[in-house]
Amino acid sequence: MKLTVFLIVIAFLSGFGVKAQTITGTFNLLAGQEVRLEGFNGFDTYLISSADVSEEGKFVLNYSEAAYGMGQLISPDNRPFIVILSGEDIELKGESFAHPETIVILKGNENRLFEQYATGHPRREQALSAWQYLERIYRMDSLFAVHQAPKNAIIQEMQRIREEDKAFLESLDPQSYVSWFLPVRKLVSSVATIAQYRTGEIPGAIAAFRSMDHTDPRLYKSGLLGDVLESHFWLIENSGRSLDSVFIEMNISIDHLVDNIATDEIIFNEITDYLFRLLERRSLFTSSEYLALKVLNEVSCTIDNDLAAQLESYRAMKPGNTAPDFAFREDVLAPGYAPSEIPGNLSDLNSEYTLVVFGASWCPGCPGDLSKIAGLYEKWNAHGVEVVFVSLDEDRQTFKSFAGRFPFISICDYRKWDSPVAKAWHIFATPTLYLLDSSREILLRPNSVRHMDAWVDWYLVQGN
């Protein structure tokens, strides 16, 4: 009797606390296929549920309150359809997710509002940009500036468009997810237009990004976290400022961001790692160095080991520092050198510049990059650049087969990431390139072979 009562209570509490919502769909072109519902978690996605579509094109997917945020419906062609998972049942009808123009939302108020704004806002943005273009003509071109009436009409129409957009957003229930999501999505989607056509709005947009709470669970579940960071720093980069001013503004934004996320260790590590890679990818090394030093020197959060190694490489291996010396031990392949003339150390090289390349045969990008370097070596070497390849391979025969075709010095101690050279140089990824002068001062950390070749062309070829 007690066991029965206990099971009834457990069943009641379980049903009381977890209420599943449904997404019901009718899509004739998806018959017989599987559909998935995925949610967003920071920069990643995760599977919420999946279902097989019946021969009549019908399916039902379930999601719980824990999946609150944005979701995407995905069919085998991997064309997603975005939905809001706000605790409401959703019903959709259409041909397939790949044809969103055919999809009708039969049930789900927040999703209807999302669709309505997603359809209308881009058209308002296009019209606003067109009117602003005309307004500049009527304001700056002497042929049109004398006509006040059309200029006033243009200004009034722009104001009407802005008010219409504002009124829609203000009409939304402030407790709803859609009321938070749409302004953020609007900010992100407007960045390119603002940079090109509405430059007067740049300071306000940057301020909006800086004031955003990056620890907000709604942002973490929105699928917009990466877009927010990308758009924020892209707008600064393309704001028409001088390069020095761009870096100043980026560093201000980094200060705002790091101070905001410093209280949440998980989010701190994820966002810092993402932003660091973003700045590196865009060759914004001044700001990636600033971020690295700020995180290492000023933040109390525990940093993941992998991230710490990346950031430490900036403190130890930044331009202007002296690169550690190392011996040419174990296996050394040195085409062009007689055995007795092979240098004993990196510092023994008699070259004006040295490009040190860390890589391996197992590294996906290394074979292609090293082949390109081999093709450019004669040109670079003629202008005083020597190349040293430090292999992180573990097998002697693999190293010799891989590096034996290169015309520059190659060395390997077969200890992979435990190589004393790799550790001394804080290597955390391959390929990694460093350009040194004759005193081993770090001049540049090229982000690609093309970057290095451009440096040679600009500073050495043209200089001669």
Image: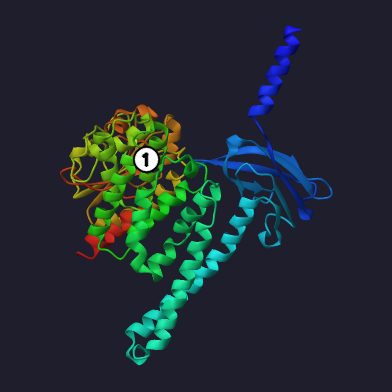
Q: Nearer the viewer, residue 336 or 152?
A: 152
Q: Quadrant of the N terminus?
A: top right
Lateral position of residue 175 relative to residue 375, left or right: right
49, above or below 451, in the image: above
Lateral position of residue 94 relative to residue 233, left or right: right
What residue appears at the point 28 percent right and 49 percent down from the top-left corner? 287
Specify whether residue 430 is in view. Answer: no
163, above or below 344, in the image: below
Q: How many marks?
A: 1
Q: Identity of the amino acid at label 1?
A: Thr
Q: Quadrant of the C terminus?
A: bottom left
Specify whether residue 220 is in view. Answer: yes
What residue appears at the point 33 percent right and 58 percent down from the top-left corner? 236
The residue tagged 1 is 272
Image location (x, y in percent) of residue 108: 67, 50
Q: Quadrant of residue 316?
A: top left
Residue at the extreme top: 1
Q: Nearer the viewer, residue 126 or 372?
A: 126
What residue appears at the point 31 percent right and 54 percent down from the top-left corner? 452
Q: Quadrant of residue 201?
A: bottom left
Image location (x, y in percent) of residue 66: 58, 35
Lateral position of residue 67 relative to residue 241, left or right: right
59, above or below 248, in the image: above
Estimate how packed mark 1 is, as few (under 14), some (14 to 19) or many (20 or more) residues with alpha carbons within 10 Å.
many
Q: How is the image coloured?
A: rainbow
Image location (x, y in percent) of residue 184: 46, 53
Residue at the extreme left: 439
Image location (x, y in percent) of residue 291: 29, 43
Q: Is disc 1 placed on a helix, strand or loop?
A: helix
